[in-house]
Image (cartoon, rainbow, N blue to C red):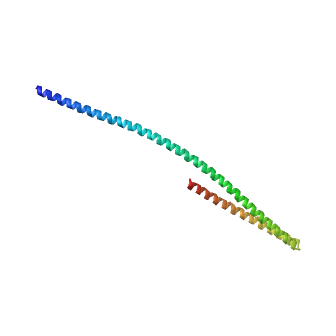
């Protein structure tokens, strides 16, 4: 009986020792996992901050590109307007010179008035055509610039 009791106590001691070892191992694993969780949370915070900064930079670049697009658009509109104005002035001067030559060479006042009306109507029609053409050209160029800017962005 004494031997059995001693044997049982030894077995109990061994089992208790194994249990303590397993508990220690599990506690160490839990501690390691908690440390890993803290580390991963830190990395997640860093990534969130980096994402926020990148988003802010993206928005700022977008605003800058938008402002540049508006500036380019305004510049092109002004350039087109000036070109159109110069072209119209040159044509008007040419038409006036032509008119003066024809007027000097003509005898009949009625014929001269009719010719003036025709030239005026032709100039007005030409002006309207040019204006329509420039508006269409400007719209296409503006759309191209917008597409290029969006592609670059």
Indicate the quadrant where residue 36 lies. top left
Which residue is at the front of the view, 3 or 131? 3
In percent of width and height, residue 143 lies at 62, 58
Indicate the quadrant where residue 92 lies. bottom right
Left or right of 27 in this view: 84: right
In percent of width and height, residue 45 lies at 46, 39
Left or right of 34 in this view: 15: left
Query: Count of labels shown?
Result: 0
**Quarter of the rendering occupied by the N terminus:** top left
Q: Residue at x 58, y 49 (%)?
A: 62
Q: Residue at x 73, y 63 (%)?
A: 128
Which residue is at the front of the view, 135 or 29? 29
Q: Residue at x 50, y 43 (%)?
A: 50
Q: Residue at x 84, y 71 (%)?
A: 101
In percent of width and height, residue 79 lies at 70, 58
Residue 141, placed above or below residue 39: below
Residue 51, placed above or below residue 115: above
In percent of width and height, residue 47 lies at 47, 42
Instruction: State the residue lying farthest toward the top.
Output: 2
Residue 115, placed above or below residue 62: below
Left or right of 37 in this view: 9: left
Indicate the quadrant where residue 43 lies. top left
Residue 7, placed above or below residue 152: above
């Amino acid at each position: 009986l004494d031997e059995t009791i001693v044997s049982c106590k030894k077995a109990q001691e061994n089992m208790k020792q194994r249990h303590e070892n397993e508990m220690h191992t599990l506690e160490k694993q839990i501690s390691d996992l908690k440390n890993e969780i803290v580390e991963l949370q830190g990395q997640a915070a860093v990534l969130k901050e980096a994402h926020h900064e990148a988003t802010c930079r993206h928005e700022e670049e977008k605003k800058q590109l938008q402002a540049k697009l508006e500036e380019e658009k305004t510049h092109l509109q002004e350039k087109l307007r000036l070109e159109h104005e110069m072209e119209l002035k040159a044509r008007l001067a040419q038409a006036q010179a032509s008119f003066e030559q024809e007027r000097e060479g003509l005898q009949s006042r009625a014929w001269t008035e009719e010719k003036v009306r025709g030239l005026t109507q032709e100039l007005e029609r030409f002006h309207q055509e040019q204006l329509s053409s420039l508006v269409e050209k400007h719209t296409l160029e503006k759309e191209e610039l917008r597409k290029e800017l969006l592609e670059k962005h």
